[in-house]
Amino acid sequence: MKKSIILLFTMLFSFGVQASEKASAESVERLMALTEVPKMMDAMHAQMTNIFSGMSKQLNLTAEQQPAFDEYMRKLAVLLKQEMNWDKLKAPMIEIYANRFTEDEIQGLITFYESEIGQSMVKKMPLIMQDSAAISQQLMMSFMPKLKQLAQELQKDLANSKQADG
């Protein structure tokens, strides 16, 4: 009887530990492959570049200023690819997922993304991101003049405060 209680306690305890087991790096990597995270990162870079490029219209650049802005945008795109690429983000992202999800949760997500509906979501997500980026770009177009006005007000207030102190 005593052995049965110990065995039952051991089984219950090990089940509890297993249920909350930290997700393995291999499982997280499998999930990221199924959700095509590296491909989504590339799409995100392209969308960010498009958003930033669209800002040149809002800035009302002159013909003389445009080449400098274009060169800046080229350098920004290169910098984004160098510093925010999948090779640099992969290990920290795996760690984040592993710390936030249990192995059972990751396995459930893998099961979902292996399903027909999950794969449909993966295929449609770039289109959703593209549409979202277009909306963000439109919002940014109306936001930039307001931001510019706010910055001018700040400069004016700082100049006035400096004159009052001096």
Image: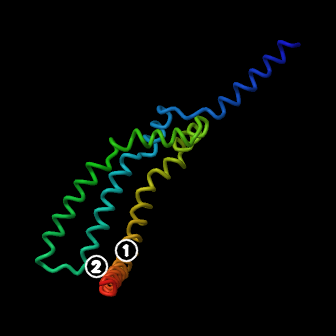
Q: Amino acid at mark 1?
A: Met
Pick out the residue farthest to the left.
64
Tell me the tag on residue 140: 1
Query: Which residue is at the front of the view, 144 or 132?
Result: 144
Tell me the tag on residue 130: none
Q: Residue at x 56, y 39 (%)?
A: 106
> As drawn, is 136 to the left or to the right of 79?
right
Quadrant of the rendered image containing residue 112? top right
> As drawn, is 77 to the left or to the right of 154?
left
Tell me the SS state at disc 1. Answer: helix
Quadrant of the rendered image containing residue 16? top right
Q: What percent of the width, then of the height, locates residue 99?
A: 54, 40
**Coloring scheme used:** rainbow
Pick out the residue farthest to the front.
166
Q: Amino acid at mark 2?
A: Gln
Marks 1 and 2: CB-CB under 8 Å?
Answer: yes
Binning the other alpha carbons within 10 Å of mark 2 as few (below 14), some (14 to 19) or many (20 upward) gives some
Q: Residue at x 66, y 33 (%)?
A: 19
> As drawn, is 45 to the left or to the right of 66?
right
Q: Is residue 110 above or below residue 60?
A: above
Q: What percent of the width, then of the height, locates residue 5?
A: 84, 18
The residue singled out by tag 2 in the image is 58
Tell me the SS state at disc 2. Answer: helix
Q: Is residue 100 above or below residue 5?
A: below
Binning the other alpha carbons within 10 Å of mark 1 as few (below 14), some (14 to 19) or many (20 upward) gives some
